[in-house]
Amino acid sequence: MNPGKQHAIITRAISHYGHERQLVKAAEEAAELSAAILRWHMTPEQETLKGLITEMADMYVMTRQLHMILYDVEEELRGEVMDMVDYKLSRLERRMDNDDA
Ligand SMILES: [Mg+2]
């Protein structure tokens, strides 16, 4: 599916279900991803891997929706998420550099 179609479906989901419902759904999906990671870690096999991939996809879709909900609430927040991603990645890089020193 092309990015434009993905964006259209995500936008439609937010307007169809509303912010409140999608925020709760995002929390549910985060919990499901957490459980799937642990299941695959404890029992690394095809079935648990398939479950992990499924939940990663769910969380990806919900993260995209969260990003869009923030943008709806306050336009400047979209940039703040990406600024925070940069900050987190830079901090991770520094930690690894320190580990290697
Ligand atoms: Mg799920």
Image: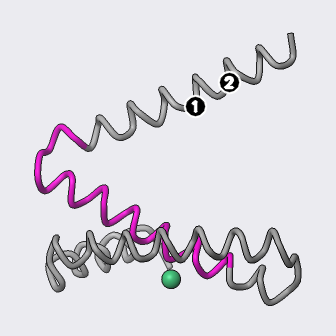
Q: Amino acid at mark 2?
A: Glu
Which residue does the numbered mark 2 point to in the structure image?
93
> Which colour assignment does the render follow?
one colour
Question: Looking at the image, do the residues carrying marks 1 and 2 touch, with CB atoms under 8 Å apart?
Answer: yes
Residue 82 located left or right of residue 14: right
Residue 32 within the magenta-colored segment of the rendering:
no
To which quarter of the image does residue 64 belong? Answer: bottom left
The residue identified by callout 1 is 89
- Magenta stretch encompasses residue 66: yes
The location of residue 100, given as percent across then percent down, is 87, 17
Image coordinates of residue 27 in percent, x first then y, are 37, 69
Number of numbered markers: 2
Separation (CA) of disc 1 from disc 2: 6 Å
Which portion, as a residue range, is magenta? 52-77
Q: Which of the pair 85/98 is nearer the observer? A: 98
42 w.r.t. 47: above or below: above
